[in-house]
Image: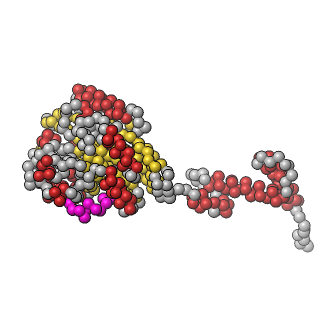
Amino acid sequence: MRKRRRRSGVSIGTMATLVFLVLVIGGCAFLFPKLLGHVDQRVSPQQVGVALENSFTAFGDTVLGQATATPTATAEPLSNVAAVVPTATATSVPSQRLSITAAGEISIDRDIQSACTNDSGYDFDFLFEQIKSRLTGDINLAALHNIVLPEEKLTNINMPATAVSALAGGGLNVLSTGFYGALNGGLEGLRNTLSVIEADGMLPYGTYLSQDQRSRVVTMDVNGLTVAFLSFQNELSSEGKKATTKEEQSYVFAPLTLPTITAEISAARAAGAKIVVVSLCWGREGATEPTKLQTEMAQGIAAAGADIIIGNNPGVLQTVAILSSTRADGSQRQTLCAYSLGSLINSDRTDRTVISSAMLHMDLKYNLETDVLTFESITYTPVYIWRGRYNGKTAFQPLIADAAAPSYVGNDQQDVMGRALSDVRAVFENSLIQER
């Protein structure tokens, strides 16, 4: 039997495919101009080819931009258009993010020290159990108004070293040490205080042991960003003045003058700081509002290049503002200014202002290309300093004022906490800063 010869030429199936393709191209020639908004209906073969190529590229881009749970049969052919991905990502703005939580003053005085004693010595961990859940930023800072002198009598200023460990255990990792009583134990007392803070893994700033140390900018590297911490004040307690020489007083802290602050901010930028935090020990104790001089000074500090300004010493909560200034290139800079965040912990019960405070939470984004810092969000946690009975003795503890009170907080104290919460909310009422 003879083998059948294979017929040459074009098969019927092939012809049908070619006819279908011609119809598709013809349809595209008619429809694409309308879809693209052209009035002229005349389309050349080259235009049809370009339109088809663009449509396939757009299809590839759309599919690549979608997250799919499982691979599909079309995934492999799309490898031909994978080259569009680097083009898209190359236009994204390079940036780094970090979060900062700033709390108020810490004053572990004799009453709190007594409340934290037990049979084996001291236990300060209880102090921060209720608020440490909010101290979760990359940087958690507060102003310490204590020193540590182990061989000296404990006072409202001098506290046990174990209290410093409790601060670290509560989540704090940066402490401003510049306050009026910082030199009550002389230069040796300051040296010991800074040593204890560093031994517990925290960064102190604001007081210095030598002129050389003062000339170096205190910084912390976080998420690829260098953050500088500066501190300024004008006064020392009479006890601190007696315990130090004029020479020591000339370098242990930086004076709160605008020329000095401007120079130190410039030095911080020159040292590579992308974010500059300025702490100020200023204002009258118990003052509920900043003075006109303070607001003018704050605006000058913002214009000098500060990103965050945090005041302490009044011991009560004051307003928080967003200040605007103009950079050298004409762009606008936003500076957060907290004139006073109040007291995070103290034993004072003079009135509600001294037992009401706030923790500020700042989510920041730094554009590495333009060197511009933006505040993505700013929120606050209201804080109430509780005093009551716990395990049969007097206890103190800062509480989150808008959260459910612990079981050991009595009804009368819950009522006070509610009024303190209203006081804190009133301070932020006309600001853009929201309660967390």
Q: What residue is drawn where x is 65% and y is 52%? A: 62
Asked if residue 122 is positioned above or below residue 401 in the image, the reply reads: below
How many numbered discs sit on the rendered protein? 0
Confirm whether the magenta stretch covers residue 401.
no
Where residue 226 appears, as percent x and y from the top left, is 38, 59
Residue 171 at x, y = what percent? 29, 49
Q: Is residue 141 visible?
A: no
- Identify the magenta region: 209-219
Q: Which residue is painted at 18% across and 38% down in the image?
A: 347
Residue at image position (18%, 49%) is 236
In front of the other: 164 or 332: 332
Residue 397 location, quadrant: top left
Residue shown at 26%/52% (left/top)? 255
Residue 188 appears in view: yes
Quadrant position of residue 156? top left
- Identify the colour scheme used: secondary structure
Snapshot quadrant of residue 313? top left
Quick check: is 217 in the magenta stretch? yes
User: Where's the C terminus, which quadrant?
Assistant: top left
Foreground pick, 62 / 252: 252
In the displayed structure image, the side of residue 40 where residue 318 appears, left or right = left
Q: Position of residue 329 (x, y in %)?
A: 49, 55
Would residue 71 appear left or right of 302 to someone viewing this image?
A: right
